[in-house]
Image: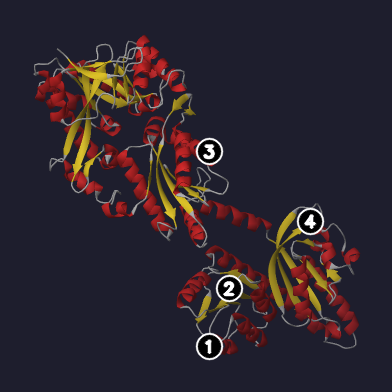
Amino acid sequence: MAVILILDDKSTNRNIFSRLAQTIEEGANVHAFASPIEALEWLEGNAPDLIVTDFRMPGMDGAEFTKHVRASTNGIDVPIIVITAYDDRAFRLRALEAGATDFLRSPVDHYEFVTRARNLLKLQRQQQQIKGRAQALEMQLRISERSQEELVRSSREALAQVIDTVPALVSATDKDSRIVFVNAHFADFVNSTPGALTGKQLSDILRSNKPEFSRQVHKSIVKNQRTSVSFEESIADSSGVERAFLTTKTLMHAFSGAETSVLTTSIDITERKQAESTLRHIALHDTLTDLPNRRMLYDWIQQELSSETSRFAILLIDLDRFKAVNDALGHAGGDRMLQMVTSRLLGTVSGNDLVARMSGDEFVVVQSNIETPKDAEDLARKIIDALSAPFLLEESEIRIGCTIGITLAPRDGQDAENLLRYADLSMYRAKAEGRNTLRFYSPEMDGVSWNNIGLETDLGKAIAQDQLELYYQPQIDLETGLIAGAEALLRWNRPEFGLTSPAAFIDIAEETGLINEIGAWVLKKACIQAAAWQDAPHRPLRISVNLSPVQFLRQDIVQLVEEALEATGLRPELLELELTEGSLLKDVERTKRILHGLKSLGVRVAIDDFGVGFSSLSYLKNFAVDTLKIDRSFISSLLAGSRDEAIVRAIISLAESLELKVIAEGVETNAQLACLLSHACDEAQGYLFSRPAATDVFDALLKENPRYLLPKQGMPSRKVQNS
């Protein structure tokens, strides 16, 4: 078993290096010291196989300690790894001249520490074997003076035969670095013969990427300044292909008082280096997208923070509507979507920026060298635009969008973990205020805790403590200008937070199963209110209620709706249930049965956010639906002659051919309304007509019985009182 000496005046480093050393090989015996003097005293009676020492220590630095080790009986040939935080070449040369074998830069990469130490131990043992064989042969030469010359010759031949069997480049050179011997493997590597190589300069034969370093090592060994040095280098073979080698140069006293020579052993480690590179890449990258993972992201941010002049932004990107893609197309479809998102992100950022995948549908961009916060805002808006454009997946156009939280460094913090937490807080703040947008971090967010901390607990109390309420947004008949229906929209009056949009808590509700209880409450509450309006003096009003995909797939929706209608007395034709495309396609056969059951009750069914998911004639033909609601993403930039105008026109034409009603949501301008009127859209809702209103406000609106004047010849839309 290996005996390893660890020297570092810092207890934390000693503990880390000791634990790492014990993993080098089974049964490793590790001795750790804080004082160089104590380590040297221990060395007088013990022979270690490997020494690891810090460079910077009080009283005696690593170079001085190495010099003392080389002067001791038990330390003359021991591999010594010096750990230093200095980049200055002078420090390394000092340690090298004192007898150091290898270097590691602090902070130490654990994998590199173990790998280098293991290789040095392996090489040390191989060298000891070769040296032992050489010493055994040398002893045989001394058996008889009468046959000394013959014994020398035969021993050298035997040694050459032994060395020829070693799968390494082995050579011996004189003090001027001229070749006096090479093994068969060496000769084959350079496509020559041992005889043809004798007398030539080693550096002329082996094309190394470290020729000057190799010459310096050779000189230090010839001058007896050190006995052994190991280092990695690249050497080109006879065909010019670069291969990685672990090279060791060792002092070798020639026989019969001849000149001292240097034994060079180079072991091919190309496959090992390739495997290390592959393993390192896997450890630092996401397997699906090949983007840097969380670990590499943390290292990158800490490296940026270490520069005093660095100014950068962290953009945390959370995909909107991605869950619907996963629900409809399964994990394989979701994976393809994440890969397409990756391509768009890489095509949007600059070459100096880092794009990483945090987890699930969260990505992070580290934007380097920013001058003002506007640089980060501009990039965030480019990303939002890039991810808002439709994706073509399985012959369908899919829209997702994203929400971005931004934090600035070093303004907001000097720690990677906190900066990412701040970006997460600002992302959740953006979601709470409306998706497909961005927000910068501010200290107030941390105090108010816009994150999900405590959200699940609070949400569980919301129904029992009567914190949920419904707001209603009118749906306008574009032929008459009258209110034809209302969409029930959930709000949570959360203590200490105020009125909260479902965007901030609906995902948690779905993950925890609370959505079933909340959804049932919304349905019953909306039916109670609609029944009250049904009995009011004004004309009957259709009420639209959103169903969560989770609720639709897990609850007995047909029974739930039937019980709500019976309990409230609402006429079935006045209830319209809104479903997303993703929830319809999750289990097609089950969806058909549920829709058939709902239609048998007499209620209406609408497809919400139509056009952003998996719009297809096939499922519209197979599913019993009554209404298509055009997603607001098409309406927001709707202008005559635009691409969105063509999409809206196609949806309206499709609905007309299938005898389906069309409702446009998110109408905010007269230009949008005018475009919808030119294509005979049935109904519209949006801020142009009214924001979502509390029950009493909506009651007052119904009593006014307004009729909206629709744009004619460029006139603005306005509300008038019916006579």
Marks 3 and 1, the one that precedes in the sequence: 1
- Give how far across and how far down residue 559 sits, in percent: 18, 25
Q: Residue at x 17, y 31 (%)?
A: 694
Q: Residue at x 37, y 15 (%)?
A: 652
Quarter holding the N terminus is bottom right
Residue underneath mark 4 = 237
Q: Residue at x 54, y 63 (%)?
A: 111
Residue 257 visible in the displayed image: yes
Residue underneath mark 1 = 38
Residue underneath mark 2 = 84
Marks 2 and 1, the one that precedes in the sequence: 1
- Give how far across and how far down residue 70 sits, in percent: 66, 84
Marks 2 and 4, the one that precedes in the sequence: 2
Q: Residues within 10 Å of mark 3 (few under 14, many from 20)?
A: few
Q: Nearer the viewer, mark 3 or mark 4?
A: 3
Marks 3 and 4, the one that precedes in the sequence: 4
* Mark number, residue 343: 3
Q: Which of the 4 image quadrants contains residue 83? A: bottom right
